[in-house]
Amino acid sequence: MTDTTDRDVAEAKAADRLLTALRTRVACEPIREFIGATDLPAAYRVQERLSKGRIEGGARVVGRKIGLTSKAVQAQMGVDQPDFGVLFDDMAFRPDQLVPMGHLLQPKAEAEIAFVLGEDLADGDLSIDRIRGAIDYGVAALEVCDSRIRDWDIAFADTVADNASAGVYVLGTDYKTLDEFDTVAVTMRMLINGEEVSTGTGADCLGDPLNAVAWLAKAARDFGEPLRAGQVILSGALGPMAPISAGDEVTVEITGLGSVTARFSEGNDK
């Protein structure tokens, strides 16, 4: 009983630290001092506490994000699998909206394919064929990753607990079914203020972004919160992320899916 109580206290402290950083927009120290650097179950329990706090504050779950889909980044973090986080309604911005920099702490942009589900992935087979059949459409996406941990000083448990370093995201407006583009063969480039800062292909995301969605569907179901129809799935970066600053304009171009552009406010307005 003491071990369980101590664990609960440590995880509550970790979640409180992250929630305070999220609320105050002041970056905090790593939370691995509470749960260790590699304890995946503990990290997801902290993430669950964080999500509960967001929901109690009025936020609504609209999807999931997948992180650490690059083998190089996995090796850097000393892990052999991706991670996932929760997308809330207040993270979504339209291309015609100015994204407030006051909403962010240490933003880094990355280009992805987002998928919107047409059916639940809760029961039965979760093969690639099932995943394909469950997807309504794909769309070019710009995800802004953000860490509540000061200076991005993160181990695996830090980023998982911190909602997989989720920030905000912007979806394009050119929706395509999976019959209209090849998820593996797409090429991507990302520009900041007109300068190319990142390139990649669909194959750079676990060999195929659909592999990432299949991994997520199984992981989410195992954690008791399966993927549902209508949810947005950010499937993981197609190339390296890049830091962004106030006043920047970021454009993602993905063959077959068109482009999406986000503009970030000059000041710290919220």
Image: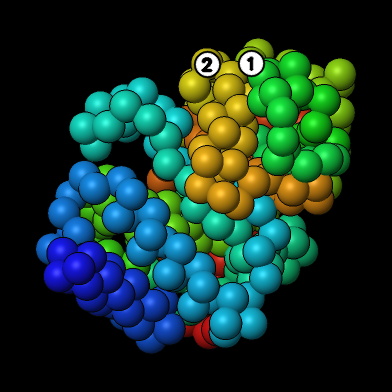
Check the image and report above or below for 52 versus 94. below
Dot 1 lies on which element? Answer: loop
Image colouring: rainbow
Q: Residues within 10 Å of mark 1 (few under 14, many from 20)?
A: some
Q: Residue at x 56, y 44 (%)?
A: 220
Quadrant for residue 96, please give it.
bottom right
Name the quadrant of the C terminus: bottom right
Mark closer to the chain start, 2 or 1: 1
Task: State left or right for residue 238 relative to residue 241.
Answer: right
- The residue tagged 2 is 207
Q: Residue at x 60, y 52 (%)?
A: 225
Task: State left or right for residue 181 relative to residue 162.
Answer: right
Closer to the camera in the image, 45 or 185: 45
Q: CA distance from mark 2 to mark 1?
A: 7 Å
Task: Give how far across and how far down residue 77 sits, in percent.
Answer: 24, 37
**Is label 2 in contact with label 1 (beta carbons under 8 Å)?**
yes
Name the quadrant of the N terminus: bottom left
- The residue tagged 1 is 184
